[in-house]
Image: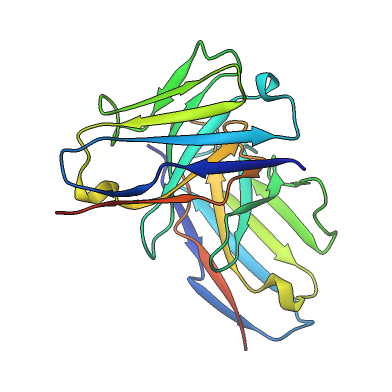
Amino acid sequence: EVQLLESGGGLVQPGGSLRLSCAASGFTFGGHALSWVRQAPGKGLEWVSAITDSGGGTYYADSVKGRFTISRDNLNTLYLQMNSLRAEDTAVYYCGRDSPVITLWGQGTLVTVSS
Amino acid sequence: EIVMTQSPATLSVSPGERATLSCRASQSVSSTLAWYQQKPGQAPRLLIYGASTRANGIPARFSGSGSGTEFTLTISSLQSEDFAVYYCQQYNNWPPGTFGQGSKVEMK
């Protein structure tokens, strides 16, 4: 089955760190760029970051630049390292296949930043 | 940054009726426009890209049109499974690929 499965979300204090993972299956992982998109509770979609198929190019929204790092490995997993977290980073984080048009979405993982 | 504005915020439609959603860009994005559908508690799903090309497996009742700054998503005959929130996304000026705020299609 073609799917993406996120993990790693949870409750973290402001200023803390969290690493999200996204496991891909059912397609040729190395042939696709990958994306992260988030959705704050009750709000719309916000593009966060993307990485090229080779991993050689990375892109970030201004709101997370310098705090978040996207990466990928050769074992079909995408990552998002999130540092210096703020309350406004609270959201469901979705990983996605391809960029800029996201052709396949994971089910999402909730990140809550609160003291 | 290009701002995407969707209208209406909410559209009340009866099953079998036609639904038309609009998306306007603050500057031209050519035909680099995608539409996504999101049902409650679910991840978004790609419907349309390139303003008018249906993604794999998307029923023919979904159609997209427009170019430049004005775009339309039309659902020709609403089915019960089509009640959802719809988002447009421009990717002409990327990054970022900015999304609209969403339009909710609800049952009348």
Q: Is residue A89 left or right of residue B51?
A: left
Find residue A115 and report its image quarter: bottom left
Asked if B97 appears above or below B11 in the picture, the reply is above
Q: Is residue A112 left or right of residue B38?
A: left
Question: Where residue B79 sits: x, y (%)?
Answer: 77, 76
Find residue A3 and report its image quarter: top right
Q: Residue B68: in sight, yes or no?
A: no
Identify the image quadrant of the N terminus of chain B: top left
B94 or B70, which lies in front? B94
Badge count: 0
Question: Where residue A105 sits: x, y (%)?
Answer: 61, 45
Q: Residue B85: in sight, yes or no?
A: yes
Q: What residue occupies the far right of the structure in this picture?
A: B60
Q: Residue at x 58, y 43 (%)?
A: A5
Q: How is the image coloured?
A: rainbow
Find residue B34 and report its image quarter: top right
Question: Where residue B16 sits: x, y (%)?
Answer: 79, 82
B96 or B24, which lies in front? B96
A26 or B106, which lies in front? A26
B30 or A55, which lies in front? A55
Identify the image quadrant of the C terminus of chain B: bottom right
Asked if A48 appears above or below B16 in the picture, the reply is above
Asked if B104 appears above or below B38 in the picture, the reply is below
Q: What residue occupies the far bottom of the structure in this picture?
A: B108
Q: Is residue A57 left or right of residue A88?
A: right
Question: Where residue B86 sits: x, y (%)?
Answer: 58, 61
Q: Residue at x 56, y 29 (%)?
A: A34
Asked if B57 appears above or below B20 in the picture, the reply is above
Q: Residue at x 60, y 66 (%)?
A: B39
